Image (spheres, rainbow, N blue to C red):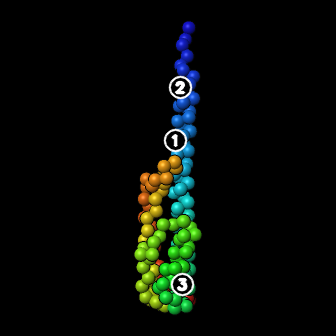
């Protein structure tokens, strides 16, 4: 007669693997979401620099536009993380910030990803 292992042990093992998979999928989703939002912000930054350089916009207007967009995308960008130098054809905008990849249940960042953007006005051809 062969003794069978506890059937609850198999269920518990399966449950642990499911929880681990959910954890990693959630981390991956948050990482991809942050990356996609940063890409959208980068594209918008390039657009704003080109338009602001052509229209001779003030540094305050440029910062305000970028802060509104970062808020829409849920990016943690603060006013002092945006540096605007020059005006018109000498315009240069740099944005440096860190975003946290959160743990699903704890809402605590375990991974910090740094983003750096440096965009200079390029005259139209």
Q: Which mark is residue 107?
A: none
Q: Position of residue 87 (x, y in %)?
A: 46, 90
Residue, x 43% and y 53% (percent of image)? Answer: 110
Q: Are marks 1 and 3 in contact (CB under 8 Å)?
A: no
Secondary-structure class at tag 2: helix
Q: Nearer the viewer, mark 1 or mark 3?
A: 1
Q: Position of residue 18 (x, y in %)?
A: 56, 39
Q: Position of residue 6 (x, y in %)?
A: 54, 20
> Is 121 located above or below residue 37 in the figure?
below
- N-terminal label among 1 and 3: 1
Residue, x 43% and y 65% (percent of image)? Answer: 98
Question: Gap in Å between the C-alphas at discs 1 and 2?
Answer: 17 Å
Q: Are marks 2 and 3 in contact (CB under 8 Å)?
A: no
Front residue of this view, candidates 120 and 109: 109
* Crowd class of label 1 (few under 14; some 14 to 19; many from 20; radius 10 Å): few
Count the numbered circles shown: 3
Question: Gap in Å between the C-alphas at discs 2 and 3?
Answer: 62 Å
Question: Gap in Å between the C-alphas at discs 1 and 3?
Answer: 46 Å
Q: Where does label 3 land, which residue?
A: 50
Q: Are marks 1 and 2 in contact (CB under 8 Å)?
A: no
Note whether residue 23 is visible: yes
Q: Position of residue 64 (x, y in %)?
A: 52, 79
Q: Which mark is residue 20?
A: 1
Secondary-structure class at tag 3: helix
Residue, x 56% and y 54% (percent of image)? Answer: 29
Q: Nearer the viewer, mark 2 or mark 3?
A: 2
- N-terminal label among 1 and 2: 2
Q: Which mark is residue 9?
A: 2
- In the picture, residue 19 is in which quadrant? top right
- N-terminal label among 2 and 3: 2
Quarter the N terminus occupies: top right
């Amino acid at each position: 007669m062969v003794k069978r292992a506890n059937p609850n042990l198999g269920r518990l093992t399966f449950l642990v693997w499911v929880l681990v998979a959910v954890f990693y999928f959630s981390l991956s989703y948050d990482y991809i979401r942050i990356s996609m939002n940063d890409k959208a912000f980068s594209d918008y930054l390039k657009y704003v620099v080109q338009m602001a350089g052509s229209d001779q916009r003030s540094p305050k207007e440029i910062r305000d536009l970028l802060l509104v967009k970062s808020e829409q995308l849920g990016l943690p960008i603060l006013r002092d993380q945006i540096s605007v130098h020059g005006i018109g054809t000498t315009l240069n905008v740099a944005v440096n910030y860190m975003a946290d990849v959160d743990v699903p249940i704890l809402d605590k960042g375990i991974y910090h990803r740094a983003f750096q953007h440096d965009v200079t006005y390029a005259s139209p051809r």
